[in-house]
Image: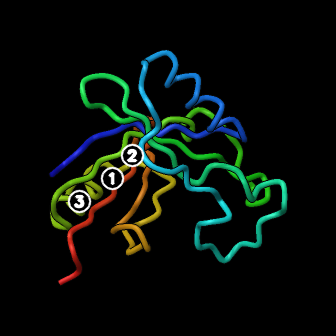
């Protein structure tokens, strides 16, 4: 089933922020917090980044889910307007994912292209208006 959520990035404050948001909305974090040390990467993480948040989810209102991650200084990440908040689309099919990605990335910048990742068919783009869009599709590869 398709889903839309909001993805927020922080510089080492994700878990703190999500615990605060949980207290505000009276909700609990969904499942376990994925730590950076648990994520597959070609990048050797320094010790002080191992326990940072790789992925976290929190329901807020009306079924909307807030997701988040910590950005990594060791990979040159810098938090700025344009990468701090992302609208995450999870279409039901790769065809719809590709259509939406192509339309939203036209005239935009910072596009990753769509690619198969361990968790899903994934891509990200900054559209022509400076809004960041992320795509995850779990339709199996045919």
Circles 1 and 2, Cβ within 8 Å, touching? The answer is no
Say the numbered circle drawn on residue 133. Answer: 2
Check the image and report above or below for 56 versus 42.
above
Q: Earlier in the sequence, mark 2 or mark 3?
A: 3
Q: Nearer the viewer, residue 59 or 9?
A: 59
- The quadrant of the image that shows the C terminus is bottom left
Q: Earlier in the sequence, mark 1 or mark 2?
A: 1
Residue ID for mark 1: 106
Q: Residue shown at 77%/55% (left/top)?
A: 49
Check the image and report above or below for 49 versus 128.
below
Q: Nearer the viewer, residue 100 or 38?
A: 38
> On the picture, is 88 further left or further right than 51?
left
> On the picture, is 140 further left or further right than 123?
left
Residue ID for mark 3: 97
Check the image and report above or below for 3 versus 48.
above
Instruction: Tell which tag, 3 or 1, sits nearer the viewer.
Output: 3
How far is mark 3 from mark 1, CA to CA? 14 Å
Q: Residue shown at 52%/42% (left/top)?
A: 68
> On the picture, is 87 further left or further right than 94?
right
Q: Residue furthest bottom?
A: 142
Check the image and report above or below for 30 versus 99.
above
Q: Nearer the viewer, residue 97 or 59?
A: 59
Say the numbered circle drawn on residue 88. Answer: none
Q: Residue shown at 61%/66% (left/top)?
A: 38
How far is mark 1 from mark 2, CA to CA? 12 Å
How far is mark 2 from mark 3, CA to CA? 11 Å
Image coordinates of residue 105 in percent, x first then y, are 35, 52
Q: Residue furthest top?
A: 24
Say which quarter of the image contains residue 82: top right
Q: Secondary structure at mark 3?
A: helix
């Amino acid at each position: 089933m398709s889903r839309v959520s909001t993805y927020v990035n922080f510089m080492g404050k994700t878990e703190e922020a999500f615990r605060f948001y949980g207290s505000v909305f009276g909700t609990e974090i969904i499942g376990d917090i994925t730590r950076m040390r648990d994520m597959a990467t070609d990048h050797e993480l320094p010790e002080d980044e191992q326990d940072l948040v790789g992925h976290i989810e929190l329901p807020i209102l009306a079924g909307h889910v807030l997701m988040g991650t910590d950005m990594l200084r060791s990979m040159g990440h810098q938090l700025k307007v344009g990468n701090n908040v992302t609208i995450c689309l999870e279409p039901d099919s790769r065809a719809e994912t590709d259509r939406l990605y192509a339309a939203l990335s036209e005239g935009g910048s910072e596009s990753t292209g769509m690619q198969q990742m361990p968790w899903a068919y994934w891509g990200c783009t900054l559209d022509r208006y400076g809004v960041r869009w992320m795509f995850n599709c779990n339709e199996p590869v045919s």
